[in-house]
Image (cartoon, helix red, strand yellow):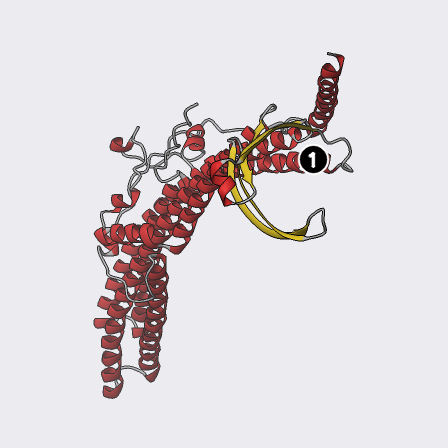
Amino acid sequence: MMAATRPAKTACALAAIALCLLAGCAGRAGPPPMSALTLPEQWRTAAPLSLAGIGRAVDQEWWQAFGDPVLSELVTQALTRNADLLTARARVLESHARVTQAHAGQLPSLSASVSPQRARAMNAFNTPIDITVLAAQVEASYEVDLWGRLAALTDVALAAERAEQANADAVGLAVAATTASAYLNLRGLDAQLELTQKTLQLRRDSLDLARRGYDAGYTSQLEWLQAKAEYEAAGEAIPQLELAIAEQENTLSVLAGAAPGAVRRGLPLAALAPPDIPAGLPSALLRRRPDIYRAQQMLAAQSAALKAAQEQMLPSFRLTAAGGVQAAGWHQFINAPAELWRLAAGLSEPLFDGQRLQAQTDIAAAQRDQAFHQYENVVRNALRDTENGLTALAKLRAQAEVNLARSRTAADTLRIAQSRYRNGYNSYLEQLDAQRTQYAVEISRLQLQTRLLVASVDLYRALGGGWQRPAPPAR
């Protein structure tokens, strides 16, 4: 009886030593750092909402709000064929397989083997004989998860899988936003090209008029040369815009998972308007951004990894069982094989490893702290993105109002300059200057309208694009 209790006492002593080691490790690792993250109660800039937008959630297919079927088609194509998004989704499948692999460590393992052997040996009379040995065996092994180390490793894999899924959602949101922005920028360039082509024709008419006046002796050579310079400046801008359009088309095609090429057009820039976007409260942003959820899951994974690293210092207990048959020759193997079996239990505890396990625990603790700080940084960046998006919309709208007034002033100035020139009250140079001013104002107006549309896309992305946090896993 005393002999039977001695191994149990030894195991208890080893477990006590391991608990002391774990307590020391936990003391060195410590809890996560104290959070210095604070959330504002309201945004600095109010969201530009109509009454219909108050209390409304962001639509998951937010790009439909622009009302352009070609834009919607391109975004849908990008979400189906974009290489970066397909790669992110493949990583989700990989992480799911790693969950299965980690969970398998908590289950018993079963293996079977058959080993026929043929050998020649010397018998007692120093005569060679041929020996045939046939053996078949089934072996089962199971590690008893006394301290939850294997369960912690499974938690690491599960959290990593959720993080990869959130990352795929974040990549999808980025692909949709980048595609929408590229298309809206393309329509802005198209509008600038159309305006420049019309301006070139007006410059051509002015050049012809100045040429006739110069030939007739009514105007000076300076006025004709000035008109020619303005015409050439407008002509120079056209190939620049055509180059920018071609590059934008190629970028948009690749985003949509196609070869570089032409892109079909939908609504013109003048028919597109930034939609109302419900911003909500800053605290709600934590539940609407996939990158924030991913950072949370990465922190959960590192915390579980720290737990698994700490528990490596505790004893591990493994059960093994094997059974089979063995016989000398096929006849005995079929009719009267010898039955073999084995049962074993093993308890192992690291006593000295040169601080290897402690170093692994310290590494896991440092990685946990890094994930903690990274989470806070992701939240701050999300708040910054939303604040910038709201401010950009507000300031661009204010700038557009000033630009509209400036455009009206430029149009009136040109009309008066043309009237005075026709009646001989001022020189042709004043009319050219008025034309130049109006062209610059119109280009600025188109650029502002494009920036407003792109700023709306940026705000949709900052708000999470209608992403919803997945339901917590069932326990």
* Residue 59 left/right relative to 291: left
Q: Amino acid at mark 1?
A: Asp
Residue 400 visible in this rendered orientation of the protein:
yes
Name the one closer to the observer, 294 or 45: 294
Residue at x-position 45% and y-position 43%:
167
The residue that label 1 is drawn on is 362
Q: Is residue 436 above or below residue 112?
A: below
Q: Position of residue 350 (x, y in %)?
A: 73, 31
Q: Residue furthest front?
A: 125
Q: Is residue 153 above or below residue 206?
A: above
Name the one closer to the observer, 274 or 412: 274
Residue 292 visible in this rendered orientation of the protein:
no
Q: Position of residue 363 (x, y in %)?
A: 67, 38
Q: Position of residue 148 (x, y in %)?
A: 58, 26
Residue at x-position 27% and y-position 74%:
203
Q: How many marks?
A: 1
Q: Quadrant of the C terminus?
A: top left
> Badge 1, how many Cα within 10 Å: few under 14, some, many 20+?
many
Q: Examine the image and state in which quarter residue 303 appears.
A: top right
Q: Quadrant of the N terminus?
A: top right
Q: Residue furthest top?
A: 1
Residue at x-position 37% and y-position 30%:
280
Q: Examine the image and state in which quarter residue 187 appears.
A: bottom left
Q: Secondary structure at mark 1?
A: helix
* Residue 452 left/right relative to 357: left
Q: Position of residue 33 (x, y in %)?
A: 64, 29
Q: Examine the image and state in which quarter residue 250 appears.
A: bottom left
Name the one closer to the observer, 432 or 102: 102
* Residue 128 left/right relative to 80: right
Name the one closer to the observer, 162 or 267: 162
Q: Is residue 183 above or below residue 225?
A: above
